[in-house]
Image (cartoon, rainbow, N blue to C red):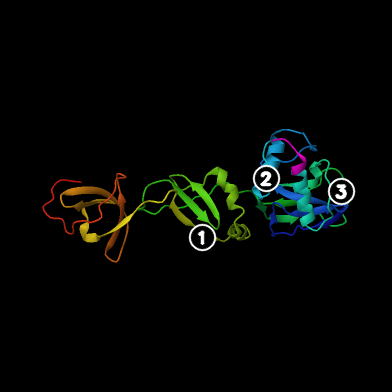
Amino acid sequence: MVTSNTCLPLEAIVSGTVAYSVNEAPVLALASSIPMWRELRPGDRGADVEALQSALAALGTGVQVDGVLGHDTLEVIAGFYLEAGYSLETLDSLPSSRLLWLPTPSVVPTTCAMNVGDKLAGSTDFATVSGGLASAQIAYPSNFVPGPRVLLVNDKVLEIDAHGAVSNADLQLISGIPGYQDAIRTTEPVPLTGVWSLAEPARAVSVPAAALSHIEGQEACIWNGSEGYAVTLLGSQLGQSIVKSATDTDLPSTVTINPKNIQAEC
């Protein structure tokens, strides 16, 4: 019999929390790459064991991911039950019925199929959720510094390709962002604010705008006397241009203002 149930329509179910209980035995919601399909006992091995350990490690538990079920893994799961207010258990095994598989770290059910007092027989639906996130992409501005990029949203760092698409491996991270949950509750556009930046910081210097010559798009030259340096323009502010070396060489500490009679390109 269902003795507790946390499911509410349009309220997120989060990995690492107890979703419901049956005969006072708590069931842990857990996002893993492979759903639990068998009862696991100490010493069991397999991809499903590794997926279980990886899911627990993603919650900051420190579980060793080695694909072998040990008592430490069972103790961590019992710890989640205890943290949720249930009695301390010593788990000798882990039946699949003690876990509720989540496809992502946070899901929002559209409907809840289980009620307190229901008697369970065989396979029983818990909730219905909308389809998962298939892709995510940002629109690049017309002018930007070339180089590998990442997108920082809240505390999540997402890898993006040259076309602005979030990598498939990182799509799951977006579902755990609070703004995403708001977005799927409405048919209206909901912006997710983030910071788009270079994957590795660029070493830049500020020079007077009058120090630039041979400007073509984002490429230009700066000079120290007759010696020229190829640079890439990163931005400008208050008469100063922010540049970085286009050839990964050290730039001079002083530059020539309004370089005259320089015919050769740097």
Task: Say whether disc 3 or disc 1 marks the residue closer to the N-terminus.
Answer: 3
| Within-10-Å neighbours for mark 3: few <14, some 14–19, many 20+ | few
Question: Is 47 or 93 nearer to us in this picture?
Answer: 93
- The residue tagged 2 is 55
Q: Identity of the amino acid at label 3?
A: Leu
| Span of residues in magenta | 67-72
- Determine the residue located farthest toward the left in the rendered image: 261
Frontmost of labels 2 and 3 is 2
- The residue tagged 3 is 120
Contact, CB < 8 Å: mark 2 with mark 3?
no
Contact, CB < 8 Å: mark 1 with mark 2?
no
Determine whether, in the image, residue 99 is placed left or right of residue 213.
Answer: right
Determine whether, in the image, residue 180 is placed left or right of residue 234.
Answer: right
Q: Quadrant of residue 67?
A: top right
- The residue tagged 1 is 193
Task: Name the magenta segment's main secondary structure.
Answer: loop
- In the displayed structure, would residue 34 be above or below residue 232? above
Task: Say whether disc 2 or disc 3 marks the residue closer to the N-terminus.
Answer: 2
Determine whether, in the image, residue 161 is placed left or right of residue 142.
Answer: right
Question: Is 192 or 245 nearer to us in this picture?
Answer: 245
Residue appearing at x 67%, y 39% in the figure: 65
Please say whether residue 68 is one of the residues in the magenta stretch: yes
Frontmost of labels 1 and 2 is 2
Q: Identity of the amino acid at label 1?
A: Thr
Task: Say whether disc 1 or disc 2 marks the residue closer to the N-terminus.
Answer: 2
Q: Identity of the amino acid at label 2?
A: Ala
Question: Is 84 or 29 nearer to us in this picture?
Answer: 84
- In the displayed structure, would residue 198 be above or below residue 42? below
Rounded to the nearest angstrom, the CA distance separating label 1 from label 2 is 27 Å
- Determine the residue located farthest toward the bottom in the rendered image: 238
SS label for mark 3: loop
